Amino acid sequence: MDIIEAIKGRRSIREYQNRVVPKETIEKLLELSIKAPSGKNRQPWRFVVLQNKKKDELVNVMSNAISLLKQKNINIGSSELSINSINEASVVILVFNAFSNCENDYRRYTLLMDTQSIGAAVQTMILAAQNFGLGTLWICDIFYCVNEICSWLNRKDELVAAVAIGYPNQSPSPRPRKLLQEVAEWM
Ligand SMILES: Cc1cc2nc3c(=O)[nH]c(=O)nc-3n(C[C@H](O)[C@H](O)[C@H](O)COP(=O)(O)O)c2cc1C
């Protein structure tokens, strides 16, 4: 697939068909994702692929954490919708920053750099997914229950993002974008 076509055609997909994404396709996506550039070539990304029972467990962990927040009247944003998308998707990939919790001298700029690198890997993954007819949702609603997810998986590194992947069951119109003049200046 043409890269411009992939960039223009990508949408966040929140509804998925009840159809399994083959393991080989997920492996290909991960292979492409790790071709992303990274600051100092540190490749800070670590991926945890969840399907079937493990994905169901994630949905439970998240749902329980979110109901506790709701009981306490704490804002839960769009997390219930995101949990629903994870539930429908064939696979969810959690993306961790390998370095943010284990390096003693982890400065703000290193964190910014590693976070950008992880963003590049996620963007590469979701664009590549287009080529396989897959829809994706980049999810940060995981932050509402990040401690619960990390302790469930017994991970000490930092959870940065989740990506739900599956065959789309919707074809949303493009979401609006600011005008280029509003976000870019020429000097
Ligand atoms: C860093 C990041 C975090 C996001 N987190 C969520 C999320 O938790 N739940 C959700 O439904 N969408 C999430 N999205 C998707 C955005 O809402 C979406 O990209 C935006 O509305 C533009 O729509 P489009 O992706 O279809 O162009 C996230 C996107 C990014 C880049």
Image: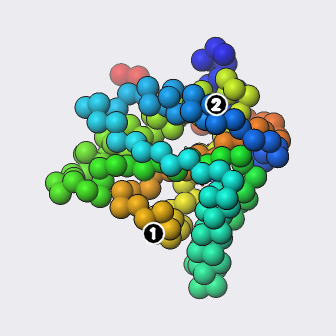
Separation (CA) of disc 2 from disc 1:
29 Å
Residue 55 percent location from the top left of the image: 64, 57
When asked about the image quadrant of residue 109, the answer is top left
Is 84 left or right of 96, judged from the image as shown?
right
| Marker disc for residue 151 | 1
Q: Is residue 76 visible in this depiction of the protein?
A: no
For label 2, the crowd category at 10 Å Cα-Cα, with few meaning under 14, some 14 to 19 and many 20 or more, is: few
Amino acid type indicated by mark 1: Ser
Rendered position, 65 above or below 86: below
Report which residue position mark 2 lands on. Answer: 25
In the depicted structure, whether residue 82 falls above or below residue 165: below
Depth check: 46 or 3 in front? 46
Q: Quadrant of the N terminus?
A: top right
Q: Are marks 2 and 1 in contact (CB under 8 Å)?
A: no
Display coloring:
rainbow
Q: Residue at x 50, y 49 (%)?
A: 48
Left or right: 83 with respect to 96? Answer: right
